[in-house]
DNA sequence: ATCGCATGATGCCGATTGGGTATCAAAAGT
DNA sequence: ACTTTTGATACCCAATCGGCATCATGCGAT
């Protein structure tokens, strides 16, 4: 169907005037052009919208239905134009936010809720993704802001750290280390490890592996799980131990214990990251919001 | 503005493909024609919809907004065509009805069955969605009536309450409160909470948070689940407690108990909501039906 | 570092569409 | 019976849309 808004507007004018010449005058076209246009519309719809006789035009019941829909369509087109211009100026729109398991376990839910209350015109669309996936989506313009394990230090991108976390060991409550108040990292040298897949968790590995090497060993990863829930499941089954961060381990399933690692003072950073060349609209508002936050004690 | 549906359809194709040649193939036109058409649209709107470089097309935030509106417009145009043809042929049409977990657990199924028996010419199309999602779909013209947590009190919309429910606490049967016949809300001050995501369950939170604050605390939400099933799962694991409404908790999984909350007399309202400017056809019939119902004792 | 390829943009031109003018047929008003 | 008004039709022209040829640019492969 090739009808466009021009025909819809012509139809609405005729429907309201019930007089072709007056409608044509109102539209700024000649009456014959209007007559042909309405005939075109009726042909495309396969429905008579008006009953015409000499000196008399009446709208049909189907025409009445089409008139209501037509006004909706014209209103919507007008709103679309306004909204797109407002979005261009940052007043409305959506913000696509990526998050890792680490990010969602930390302050991010509170940040998003607070921002949403301040900017109700902006629709937030959180979507889960490991660090690498989020960076790909940012590069492809499918994400506005990511919350990833960082710092990333990538050209063309800006970052703002939002939390740091201590590393902890997690093991089954039947594990020999479970009774300990804390451990040294080297005590894990002979343990089997359960972790996320090496491709998805690459950024986490980039922090963990050097720490282990400094303690004199390479972690023996015998099981890879899809996500943290899977990691917990495997660890609670006695498949091995894992090293994660403290906030991810809030709300641990039963059968697991958390053990601080005394000699690892480094902390894992979750950072907000966005493209420098995408600083428009809702993204700019959110970045300004982030930069305006005070620094909570365990987040930066 | 001379943009017509042709440009809108071209724009949607580019927005979905993010590739001019593939979009042109899909539209059946040559790539240069599409390139010029999109430039015409951007000129008319005065807004860049895409950022293009060699081998790369990305949609702008404003483009994202226009994409949502564009899909609305095309849906509405298609619906207008269908409706005008149905009207021409004596048929009445379809009614797209949204519902939350709260709504479908209450009187809605009975209402829909009764209405369908009275209006066999109208096709009912129920679809699940949290309150926010339904409000978005209503705004986008993809829903005719929503059954949401209310009241919503939004300009341009009308509402009709259909049920109210008491709040109840749900906890694991091993929880220390599980033996109680009832509790005071303040007794939950030091409990961990499990709930739906803060973005999806915003409307429920808008009722719950003030009740908790009046009792002197802010609920400590430590886990967010995707839906009520996930909430029940996490609570039964001992992750925390939750506060929901009585009808949602009919048919609870094993391992959970419901505890009335004595000092919370407020009730959660499920309300039917529709756009004032969409009161035509099947929507008008259904609204008239709702308004004609007697008020059952626990549904307003 | 260089070359080839893919992509979106531009120029030119023909086909198609929209609208103006002239005019018609018919019916209502005088 | 005559005049006027209205929507429809015929003809023609201007504007617009889209195809083809080509260009400029940047990315990927070597």
Image (tube, coloured by chain):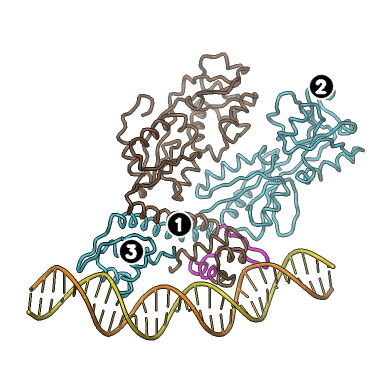
Chain colours: A cyan, B brown, C orange, D yellow
> Where B177 sits versus A106, above or below?
above
Residue B80 pos. (x, y %): 39, 55
Residue depicted at 84% across the width and 25% down the height: A177
Is the N terminus of chain B in the top left, top right, bottom left or bottom right quadrant? bottom left
- Tag 3, which chain? A
Question: Disc 1 designates what residue?
Answer: B73
Quick one: SS at disc 3? helix
- Determine the image quadrant of residue B252: top right
Question: In the image, are marks 1 and 2 on the same chain?
Answer: no
Give the total number of marks visible in the rendering: 3
- Residue that numbered label 2 is attached to: A179
Viewer-side label of 2, 3: 3
Circle 1 packing at 10 Å, graded few (<14), some (14-19), many (20+), is: many
On the same chain: label 2 and label 3?
A: yes
Q: Secondary structure at mark 2?
A: loop
Q: Where does label 3 land, which residue?
A: A11
In front of the other: D3 or A181: D3
Residue at 46% of width from left, 57% of height from top? B74
Nearest-to-viewer mark from 1 and 2: 1
Residue that extends furthest to the right in the rendered view of this protein = A216
């Amino acid at each position: 169907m090739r009808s466009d808004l021009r025909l819809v507007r012509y139809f609405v004018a005729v429907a309201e005037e019930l007089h072709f010449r007056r409608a044509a005058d109102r539209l700024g076209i000649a009456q014959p052009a209007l007559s042909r246009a309405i005939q075109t519309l009726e042909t495309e719809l396969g429905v008579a919208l008006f009953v015409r006789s000499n000196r008399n035009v009446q709208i049909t019941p189907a025409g009445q239905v089409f008139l209501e829909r037509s006004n909706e369509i014209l209103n919507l087109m007008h709103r679309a134009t306004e909204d797109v211009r407002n979005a261009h100026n940052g007043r409305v729109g959506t913000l696509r936010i990526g998050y890792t398991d680490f990010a969602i376990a930390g302050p991010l839910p509170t940040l998003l809720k607070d921002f949403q209350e301040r900017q109700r015109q902006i629709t937030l669309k959180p979507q889960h993704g490991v660090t690498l996936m989020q960076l790909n989506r940012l590069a492809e313009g499918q994400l506005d802001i990511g919350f990833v394990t960082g710092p990333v230090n990538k050209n063309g991108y800006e970052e703002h750290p939002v939390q740091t976390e201590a590393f902890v060991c997690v093991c089954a409550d039947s594990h020999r280390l479970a009774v300990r108040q804390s451990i040294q990292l080297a005590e894990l040298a002979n343990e089997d490890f359960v972790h996320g897949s090496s491709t998805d968790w690459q950024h986490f590995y980039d922090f963990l592996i050097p720490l282990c090497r400094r303690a004199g060993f390479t972690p023996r990863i015998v099981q890879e799980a899809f996500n943290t829930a899977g990691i917990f499941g495997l660890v609670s089954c006695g498949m091995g131990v894992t090293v994660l961060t403290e906030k991810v381990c809030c709300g641990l399933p039963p059968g697991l214990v958390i053990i601080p690692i005394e000699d690892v003072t480094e902390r894992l950073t979750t950072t907000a990251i966005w493209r420098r060349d995408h600083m428009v609209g809702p993204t700019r508002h959110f970045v300004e919001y982030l930069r305006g936050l005070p620094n909570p004690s365990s987040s930066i």
